[in-house]
Image (cartoon, grey):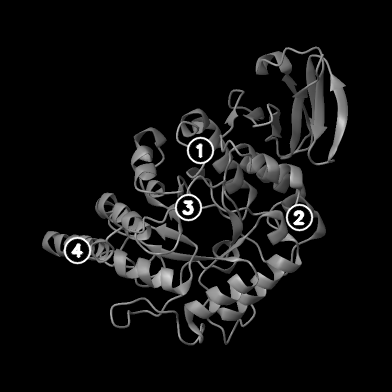
Amino acid sequence: PAAMLNRAVLAALAAVLCLAAGHPHPVHTQPGPIPPPMGWMAWEIFRCDVNCDKDPTNCIDQELFTQTTDSLVAGGYLAAGYDTIHLDDCWSEKSRTDGKLVADKTRFPQGLKYLGDYMHSKKVKFGLYTAESDHTCAGYPGSKGFEMVDAQTFADAGVDYLKVDGCGDKEYYPTGYPLMGSALKNVSRTIVYSCSWPAYLGHDEYTKPFTTMIDIGCNLWRNYNDIQCNAGSLFNIIDHWGNYSQFFSNFAGLGHYNDPDMLLIGNPCITDDEARTQMAIWSISAAPLIMGNDLRNVSDAARAILLNKHAIAVNQDPLGRQGVRLSPFGTTEVWGRVLSTNAYAIALLNKDASASQQISVKFADLNMLSKQVDVFDIWQQKSLGAFSTQYTATVPAHGTAFVLLTEVSQ
């Protein structure tokens, strides 16, 4: 096995070097200082449903992704910033053709490039999935040892964003993820690089190689458990993020973000108050806003949360600075993020599942020393007026008040 690994590593390195040798001036395409990515991903709801005869409207096939592209545009999501449609696992044939990954010929009869061209014709970007392992988590061919070949295949198909999962031997990740990063830099297309590496290294965030991930070109990385479609999973991730938020903020910035996983908003597995909580905490945390719903069937209330321009503006703030939990772990919490406008985005989080709670933020704790602070309610999309020392909200069970605090000029 060690010899096989070495051969795979050497082959992949050789491929990268050969490509570089073919370019007197290597391309080195990188996304640059991008804000947190926004878009839609198939996995949360559609998983690996490949039985199109039995479930033609929900299986992973060409029609699902063209329909979802159309829904992204028609529903106003693209205009709001959700600009990428992501295929996740289970899109390929079960074996390579001439050493290359190819889309399943039955479910994607016109191939990957057709799908990319279709998305691009609608001004939508194309996201795809692979894994730094022999096989993906669902058993399809992975990219271990094929980093350069696959990067070129993805570039040729018009891919704009690549999620790279693990699913195999963790000992390969310190080799494989840098190889894929190098390969993506050396194709003639700019591709956002999403790394799942740290999600496979346990739950102690202090031990993970975040600086290395930034150096190898990861624009975002999954840190923790996959989100499941229920409130328990959502709040578990929020607690983990809060416990490590100060540490996480050292590594987040324009072009590289901690990723707590997909938005559940738009699914009936969480309430509207829980949906507002996720939107608020993800926005405070400068997290990717990647929807995991069925865009063909989203309620008006969920759509309003997803399209709230003030929440999105907090998430996409030009500083790219990750906010933190300001209060200790508890049933009620205060989260905050300083914005480029010098305003403070504040989330007042109620984790009580059965009762409303009054939650306050004291302005002095934020070093806001003006006599008056304007409070703008992001959910109501209006100013609540000026307050002198603190703001208190009555927050529903599992809900979050989300406000902007701005010092009033004296």
Q: Residues within 10 Å of mark 1 (few under 14, many from 20)?
A: many
Q: Is residue 27 left or right of residue 31?
A: left
Question: Tag 3's secondary structure?
Answer: loop
Q: Amino acid at mark 3?
A: Pro
Q: Position of residue 129 (x, y in %)?
A: 45, 65
Of marks 3 and 1, the one in the foreground:
3
Which residue sits at x=46%, y=74%? 157
Mark 4 lies on residue: 14
Q: Pick whichever of labels 2 and 3 is earlier in the sequence.
A: 3
Of marks 1 and 2, the one in the foreground:
1
Mark 3 lies on residue: 31
Q: Residues within 10 Å of mark 4 (few under 14, many from 20)?
A: few
Question: Tag 1's secondary structure?
Answer: loop
User: Does residue 328 lie above or below 190 as drawn?
Assistant: above
Q: Amino acid at mark 1?
A: Gly
Mark 2 lies on residue: 302
User: Does residue 391 lie above or below 62 as drawn?
Assistant: above
Q: Give the CA distance from mark 4 to mark 2.
A: 49 Å
Question: Tag 2's secondary structure?
Answer: helix
Mark 1 lies on residue: 253
Residues at marks 2 and 3 touching, judged by CB atoms closer than 8 Å: no
Residue 58, by quadrant, is bottom right
Q: Give the CA distance from mark 4 to mark 3.
A: 24 Å
Q: Is residue 138 left or right of residue 87?
A: left
Quarter the C terminus occupies: top right
Q: Pick whichever of labels 4 and 2 is earlier in the sequence.
A: 4
Q: Pick whichever of labels 1 and 2 is earlier in the sequence.
A: 1
Q: Give the CA distance from mark 1 to mark 2.
A: 28 Å
Q: Residues within 10 Å of mark 2 (few under 14, many from 20)?
A: many
Residues at marks 4 and 2 touching, judged by CB atoms closer than 8 Å: no
